[in-house]
Amino acid sequence: MSNSIHSSASSEPRQPLAAAANRPLLEIHNLSTHYVSAQGTRVVRAVDDVSLRINAGETLGIVGESGSGKSTLALTILRVLPMAAQIAGGQMWFEGEDLVRKSDAEMRHVRGKRIAMILQDPMASLNPLFTIGDQVAEPIRVHEGTGRAKAWQRAKDLLKSVRIPSPETRVTQYPHEMSGGMRQRIVGAIGISCEPRLLIADEPTTSLDLTIQAQYLSLLRDLQREHGLALIFITHNLGIVARMCDQLAVMYAGRVVESGPVSRIFNGPAHPYTEALLNSIPRMSDGRQRLTAIEGQPPDLSAMPHGCAFAPRCPAAFDRCHKEAPPEFNLADGRTARCWLAGVSARGAAA
Amino acid sequence: MRQFIARRLGYSLLSLLLLSLTIFFFVRVTGDPATLLVEPGASEEDIAAIHQQFGLDRPLWVQYGLFMLNLVRGDFGQSFYYQTPVLELYMNRLPNSLLLASVAMAFSLLVGIPTGILAAVRVGRFWDSAGKLFALLGLSLPSFFVGLVMILLFSVYLGWLPSSGSGTPLHLIMPAFALGWYFAASHMRLTRSSMLEVLGSEYVKLARLKGLPQALVIGKHAFKNALIPVLTLAGINLVLMINVAVVVETVFAWPGIGRLLYEGISFRDFPVVQGIVIMGGTMIVAVNLLVDVVYAVIDPRIRLEK
Amino acid sequence: MSISTETIILPSHAPPRATAARRSDFPLLPVIILGSIAFMAVFADFLAPHNPEVGALTARFHPPFWQDGGSTDHLLGTDQLGRDVLSRLIFGARVSMVVGFTAVIFAGVIGTVLGILAGYIGGWVDQVIMRITDAWLALPALTFAIFLAAIVGPSMWNIVIILGLVYWTRYARVVRGEVLSLKEREFVRLAVVAGCSKLTIMRRHILPNVVNSAIVLATLMLGVVIVTEASLSFLGVGVPPPQPAWGLMLSDGKQGLMVGYWWLTVLPGCCIMLMVLSANLLGDWLRVKLDPQLRQL
């Protein structure tokens, strides 16, 4: 193993209990990522005690406001964190290995090849000084050692599979010569180029026109089916979640407040935050006159209140909520909720 | 693209015009420019002749017209000391200054760029602090002091290098170092901040996410993008070097433009001084234009802009 | 399920040491140095052991006291005219300080005023001022200064004016940029709506907000101005003799260089270097302190 681990415990963490045959593709246990200021005085708990799982071929949606920790979580999975951020605890089990304990050199073989990621702004993610072909062929050449000609041919095929017209001409062009929608497809092509098992998409449609969003989403679905990809879809848009995702995790202030199958959560949210989110979506059918927003502001992650992070804004909060932070309770149907209200009706103890 | 160049060109011409106006204005601001334009110790007739030649009794705008006409024809007046046209003198000395500046520039880039990259990649740690120290020293030590100390060390105490003159590569080492020192620090600073900015960009993040090795991320993706502002600055600095090498050339008696300027002041040879200032300003305007145009040509983003 | 979770700190890169904390520390040493130089400048008459302008020809080229041939009479030696180096250094501080500060303030005032006018009033005023600024910026500072010095002749105040004329353009550029962004801010718009005259707005709202940048720029320019002044003196077009100036001392000292009279060049050079270094460090600190964008988490 690498020498970059400073382990304080004497025992090795045990493997997850699920059977090998249908064990989850990625299983995250109590992951925490903290940003520490240069003087060491302020600690921002960007990701706090997060546990998730995703099976092969599944789509997991991660939903939350900006600052809820979704992007940091994604970057943590791939261990591409800025210098000020450190993993403060937890494990990430991917195909039987703990990603947290891997060295940077070992992670390099995971990134792009076994787990890939799509970023939000396609214009910014593509290097303006290199051609499309170069940037799409690059991971193939690095991970699979393919020669230039073959890699470029694969790049053209990839562009075709993401439905970019006339890939032969596109391949020698530069990013700024493409439209926003095309650029995002190219980024998608880069993502699937080495046939990863898991694709993480961080708000991929946020910077696209509405008309193009639908096309892009259906493209993602098709790619997922064709390549047997598991997809983690990070978004703040519940409508997309409804269309694309099988499972859902709702994040607030760096913690997962609710998780489980999408349909069940939508039909009966267990956490007041989720309920408020669902209620705030304007619908033509309901009779409300005014838009409902959630009162208040998300908390300062470097100075978290005692008790539940959502309590200051929660309409259903009671005494205990302000004093003690609730643990994650397991509910029926593979759902979890981090709420004392759920604790009342939960059958199991804290996870 | 063509529009862009045309616009830029017009802008440069305007700058040149203002420059010449400024020079013209200042020469006349102290009263009788004839005192500047004649040799020291000239007679009454000489002064009258100068008045005639430059039309100093004529209205200002006529004078300016004559001035500009001469400039455009390349007539910068004649040096009192050398009795040759200023432009000719200038052109004779220019290659020497170019040589010195080129070597100094090469030195500053060879030192500045790698240290800047190293400081950026190891930001906050030892090499960054070392780099910052180096930059501070470079920007705070005047070039002539560096030159004098080097002479003391390498010519007087060690006797390795010649202290003045030109002719062999050995003569070039110390002046180039003294001249390039400041610019090495300046280039290092810019490389560092440019590199830091690029390292924080989304496309570098994606390059890492693709699983590319660190060498490729920095050497390919970050490097080329980070270097653009540095090379731009370097181009402008080269021309600047030629002009501010006055002191270094004086210290080392290097026969370039700078030394010519020094001679101009020492011998009260005003046409030479005026000529060098005009040429200096013109060169910088020209190089700014050139850099903008080259930038537009090589950067694919601007190239295809209508 | 109970999976043990040890706290594993696995940095992707090694965390930086607290260099940021050090950077924002008050630069004590630079301020002490600048203060000492200012002190020397003001109290030169009392501090200098000898008359800096008159020397005894019998006491030429004495080395500093710690070398053979030196004496404690002339702690840092004498120059080619027998003048005491230490006294000349002390009086030289006066020139550097006065010229440095005055020129920087002079350039700063002109540049800030023109920058505010250009930025706030806009239109043809902006065009004119900016075109002149760009044209003047194309003239290399040292060359321009030499040119002007050749025209008006050297004297201390001429040099100050010249340096002011050469360097105001740097302020104008920066200040104008700030003003342009300030113009869009709420409190300025409120003042406009309230009917304040342009002059009032510029004076009461814009000016206080650009002063910070102007001050930072001034400290950074101090070093540059001092080097330019020293260069001018070195070339013989600076402050005229017999008034001692560090640059002039360097020029004089060049004669003795080839025979190893190092103290005539190294000592004044070190003084220049210390002053410029201190000004630069102070300017860097001020920039971090006064610019809220650069403050760390």
Image: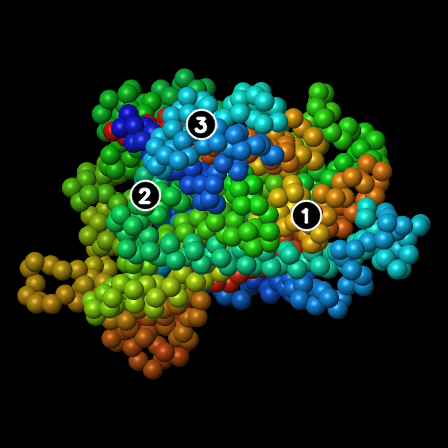
Label 3 SS: helix
- The residue that appears at 93% across and 50% down in the rendered structure is C69
Residue B54 versus residue A146 in the image, above or below: below
* Front residue of A317 and B249: B249
Chain of the residue that carries numbered disc 2 in the rendered image = A
Q: Position of residue A137 (x, y in %)?
A: 40, 26
| Farthest front residue in view | B44
Q: Position of residue A185 (x, y in %)?
A: 28, 35
Residue that label 2 marks: A121
* Figure quadrant of residue B158: top right
The amino acid marked with disc number 3 is: Gln
- The residue that appears at 11% across and 59% down in the rendered structure is A283
- The residue that appears at 35% across and 48% down in the rendered structure is C129
Inter-mark Cα distance, 2 to 3: 67 Å
Asked if badge 2 and badge 3 are on a common chain, one would say: no
Chain of the residue that carries numbered disc 3 in the rendered image = B
Estimate how packed mark 2 is, as few (under 14), some (14 to 19) or many (20 or more) residues with alpha carbons within 10 Å: many
Asked whether the viewer can see residue A113, the reply is no
* Front residue of B70 and B251: B70
* Figure quadrant of residue A337: bottom left
Q: Nearer the viewer, mark 1 or mark 2?
A: 1
| Farthest right residue in view | C68
Residue that label 3 marks: B53
Picture disc at residue C247: 1
Q: Nearer the viewer, mark 1 or mark 3?
A: 3
Inter-mark Cα distance, 1 to 3: 39 Å
The amino acid marked with disc number 1 is: Gly
